[in-house]
């Protein structure tokens, strides 16, 4: 199994997200992560799609996406040529006994504590997928109460003249 991170520049209009996600569902493939937002040009949105599968299948998905009328450009965000980030909010059970240990983990990862209550701490962390996974893994012994992730977003490195 391989993972692909695709950055799609698409027309900013109704129905585009449905057509892109429909391409995956019609073929029975799952989208691991999907983020969408307007670009510096309001005529376009940028979608970042993360999917797992066999290399041949992922290549076929990329080719099928390129055939969609609303897709202007597709960029494969490989780790060596791109910067990708994700945001996670995690609420962890934290009483007087373990609060210090939880805040130490937050400090190590440079996570921001955004809410503290008598029985819990909520933290915010931005980073690549590996950093987010490592952070969550270290917090599991403290009972994760709630967790939400934004999904991966990213751009190519350097000064490429993209649309």
Image (spheres, helix red, strand yellow):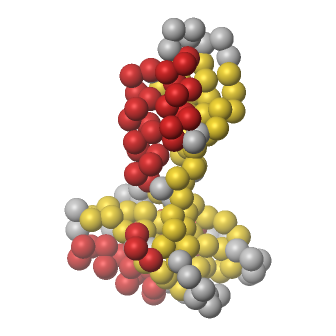
Identity of the residue drawn at 60% across and 13% down: 119
Q: Is residue 61 above or below residue 97?
A: below
Q: Residue at x 55, y 73 (%)?
A: 155
**As displayed, is residue 36 above or below residue 144?**
below
Which image quarter is the C terminus in?
A: bottom right
- Res. 76 in view: yes
Residue 43 placement (x, y as % from top left): 74, 81
State the image coordinates of residue 56 (x, y, percent, origin top left): 23, 76
In the displayed structure image, the side of residue 22 where residue 117 appears, left or right: right
Give x and y (percent) for residue 70: 58, 83
Quarter occupied by residue 62: bottom left
Residue placed furthest toward the top = 96
Q: Is residue 41 above or below residue 49?
A: below
Image-quadrant location for residue 39? bottom right
Residue 61 or residue 46, whichever sits in front: 46
Whether residue 28 is visible here, answered yes or no, is no
> Who is closer to the viewer here, 50 or 13?
50
- 58 vs 158, nearest the viewer: 158
Q: Is residue 152 above or below residue 122?
A: below
The x and y percentages for residue 152 are: 51, 59
Q: Is residue 13 left or right of residue 99?
A: right
Q: Quadrant of residue 6?
A: bottom left
Image quarter of the N terminus: bottom left
């Amino acid at each position: 199994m391989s993972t692909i991170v695709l950055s799609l520049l698409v027309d900013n209009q109704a129905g585009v997200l449905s057509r892109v996600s429909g391409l995956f569902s019609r073929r029975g493939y799952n989208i691991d992560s999907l983020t969408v937002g307007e670009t510096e040009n309001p005529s376009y949105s940028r979608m970042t799609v993360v999917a797992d599968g066999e290399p041949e299948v992922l290549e076929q998905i990329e080719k099928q996406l390129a055939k969609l009328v609303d897709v202007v450009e597709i960029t494969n965000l490989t780790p060596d040529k791109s910067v990708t980030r994700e945001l996670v909010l995690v609420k962890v059970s934290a009483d007087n006994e373990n609060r210090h240990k939880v805040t130490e983990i937050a400090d190590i990862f440079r996570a921001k504590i955004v809410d503290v209550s008598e029985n819990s701490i909520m933290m915010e962390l931005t980073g690549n997928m590996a950093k987010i996974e490592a952070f969550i893994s270290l917090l599991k012994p403290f009972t994760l109460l709630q967790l939400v992730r934004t999904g991966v977003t990213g751009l190519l490195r350097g000064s490429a003249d993209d649309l």
